[in-house]
Each structure stands twice: as C-alpha cells, then as structure tokens.
Image (cartoon, helix red, strand yellow):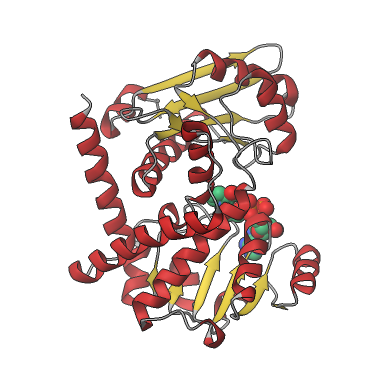
Amino acid sequence: MGIHVLDAMSREGFEEVIGVHDRKSGLRALIAIHDTSVGPAFGGIRRWTYISERQALMDVLRLSRAMTRKCVLAGVAGGGGKAVILDHPNLDREAAYRHLGRKVHQMAGRYYTGPDVGTDDAALGWLAEETPFVTCPGDAGPGDLAAATAAGAFAGIRAALRHLDGEADWPSRRVVVQGLGSVGAQLARRLKDVGATVIGTDIDVEHGRAVATELEVEFVEPSDEVEVPCDVFAPCALGGMLHDVTIERLSTRVVAGAANNVLAKAHHADLLMARGVLFLPDFVTNAGALLRGAMFHLEGRHMELAEIEQRIEGVCDDVLQRAAAEDEPPARVAKGIADERIAARRAAHS
Ligand code: NAD
C-alpha cells in the first residue's frame, strides 16, 4: 500500500512532516509537527524497529497529534510534535542522535524534543550537546520527569475516587500498579504514603519483586494482575493492554495511570463504561512530564509536584463532570474537549 503523506496530514491538520536521512550513521527518522498555533511543538523521540515506513509515519502522526491534545487539556501554551527513529541493527546510535539533534537545532525552537521509548539518558545527553531545544530530566533541567508523570497519575486516581464516592478515603482503597518502572514505582510510593493498600506487578518479576520489597508493598505475578480485586487499576507499563480479553477479566471500579495509549482500540472506552469501570484516559492523566518540560522551557521555572497534581486533577474533574452529564465515556469527552480547543486556538491564530 502506498504512502499518501499529504492526504494523511490534511485529514488531521498537521503542519509539517520532515524526513531525516544520514548515510553515515544510518539514521532514518521522521519529525511530525502537528500544531504550533500558540507556541512551539513538544514531544520526544521514539526509537523503534518499525515493520515499514508506513507504520513509522502513522506512529509519528498519531503521537504528535496526541501531544497537541495533551497540551490543550493541560493548559500548555504549545502544541504537539514527535520524532521517530526507524531503528535497525546497523544504526550508529550516537551519531544518529547527534545528527537528529542538529536537525532539531535548525528548527530554531519550533520543536522541543525529549525522551520517549528507546531514548534514554545517554541519547538525551548527545542531543543536549547539539541543541538546547531538548528536555533532559535532572536538576539542570526541569527536574524528575517520571515523578511529574506519577504525580499526574495520582491526581487522576484521586479525582476518579472523589467523583465516585465523594472522597478519596485512601486507607480503604486497594490499588494495583501495573509496571514498577520509573513512573510506577513512584506512583506506588505516593499511594502508600497516603495510606492506600498497594499491589505491584511487573513482567520483569525479579525487578518487580525487588521494587515491591523496597516499597514494602505486595507483589502479584503479572499473569494474575488484571483479576486482582481492587478499587483502582493503574497501568504504568506498555500501551494497548486494555482489550476485549483483559477488560472482561478486570475486577476494578477505576482505571487510571500513566501508560500511553492504554486502550487497544477507541471503542474499548465504551466496553469499560458498559462494565461499570470508570476509565480516565492517559492523555489527561500522564501530562505531568510535559507540564514540567514545557514550563521549564517556556517560563524558565521548575513546576512543583503539588502544582502538577492540582492542575491535572482540575482537568480530570472537568472531564468527569461532563462525561457524567452527557452519559459518555470520559475518554471520548476528553478528546472532544481537546479537539474543540484545538479548533478554537487555530481559528484565533489563523
Ligand atoms: P519504564 O520502562 O521505566 O517502566 C515500565 C515497567 O513496566 C518496566 O519495569 C517493565 O518491566 C514493566 N512492564 C512492561 N510490560 C509489562 C506488562 N505487560 N505487565 C507488567 N509490567 C510490565 O517506563 P516508565 O518511564 O515508567 O513509563 C511507564 C509508562 O508511562 C509507559 O507507557 C510510558 O510511555 C508512559 N509515560 C511515561 C512518562 C515518563 O515521564 N516516564 C511520561 C508519559 C507517559
């Protein structure tokens, strides 16, 4: 099947797609800019072994558009962008990231890049040596990004519990945290600190058990995780984990966490609602790192975790109230609010 780049771009109003090729390093990358109508585009670099160029294009378009939605909902004066590197065994990783960093630099602040799947601290270091238009976690930058993401997920969980029961009432809650990595471990700690019962799980059982022991929380085998009776299931692992089979097995009232694109298909939001599970979409609850990075670059300030929690909880409250009033899944309502705001900001700045 051919690739109709311009058709794909015009369907969703993308501004620009750039192909980057470097013979020396073997770099093949795409940068997509979805929206810069009110400020620069924000979004990290995903390095992935795509099965085709078409798949890479679809991914970069989908991810950059999702970043615009995240920005408008979180109140960031910027829009969505994203880069993907088409990984292959002969890629000279350092040279490739440096080349891409120089490309980002030529864009002169129209696009700020940062971490995503496959882009680790070493890669961020190479990028930062080529351009200031990159978000690097740490004290010299905006601070701990995973902590910011965990704060947003925590805020989403609190909003959902308040929405259902009028209060969070942590000591009576059981929360399953799926994926005890950078974000999940910090979320588990935050939940434990407020008195919730936390059950952790991780596909890397050795790592998961070690984190659970350190945090003094229960650990369950990853095969059993979705069936554990709980108040909240918090996905902090990979995307696509909510589908026909897992949704049938869930034994929770709320799903809210950090993992990107957690629904396998959009219609799974309806299935969750039909099963009486309140699902808060990831592009609302996992905007903490984006907020920290954007505030650092746009306003030169360090955003505290309490402010991130407050901001994201406010967005969740709005989405949940509107979803209840319209009897629609929160995921569809959040997308609708985001798309209305994107249209309005584009109209105001055209
Ligand atoms: P990470 O790689 O540090 O941790 C992910 C953990 O999930 C790992 O320990 C891994 O072993 C585990 N895992 C993978 N598949 C699993 C499965 N099927 N069942 C149970 N555990 C599984 O990643 P992270 O930075 O903590 O990010 C977690 C999620 O949050 C990802 O989806 C990421 O895209 C999303 N996210 C992260 C940030 C951030 O600031 N790090 C920001 C926005 C969104």
Q: Position of residue 11 (x, y in %)?
A: 27, 32
Q: Is residue 302 above or below residue 254?
A: above
The residue located at (60%, 47%) in the rendering is 145
Q: Quadrant of residue 163?
A: bottom left
The residue located at (68%, 41%) in the rendering is 138
Q: How many marks?
A: 0
Q: Is residue 215 above or below residue 50?
A: below
The residue located at (52%, 72%) in the rendering is 233
Q: Quadrant of residue 212?
A: bottom right
Q: Nearer the viewer, residue 104 or 85?
A: 104
Q: Position of residue 192 (x, y in %)?
A: 64, 75
Q: Nearer the viewer, residue 95 or 136?
A: 136
Q: Is residue 164 above or below residue 296?
A: below
Q: Position of residue 279 (x, y in %)?
A: 40, 68
Instruction: Answer yes or no: is residue 92 visible.
Output: no
The residue located at (36%, 60%) in the rendering is 314
Ligand 1 visible in quadrant: bottom right
Q: Position of residue 174 (x, y in %)?
A: 56, 82
Q: Quadrant of residue 137?
A: top right
Q: Residue furthest bottom?
A: 172
Left or right: where 25 falls relative to 84: right
Q: Is residue 37 above or below residue 329?
A: above
**Quarter holding the C terminus?**
top left
Q: Nearer the viewer, residue 67 or 203?
A: 67
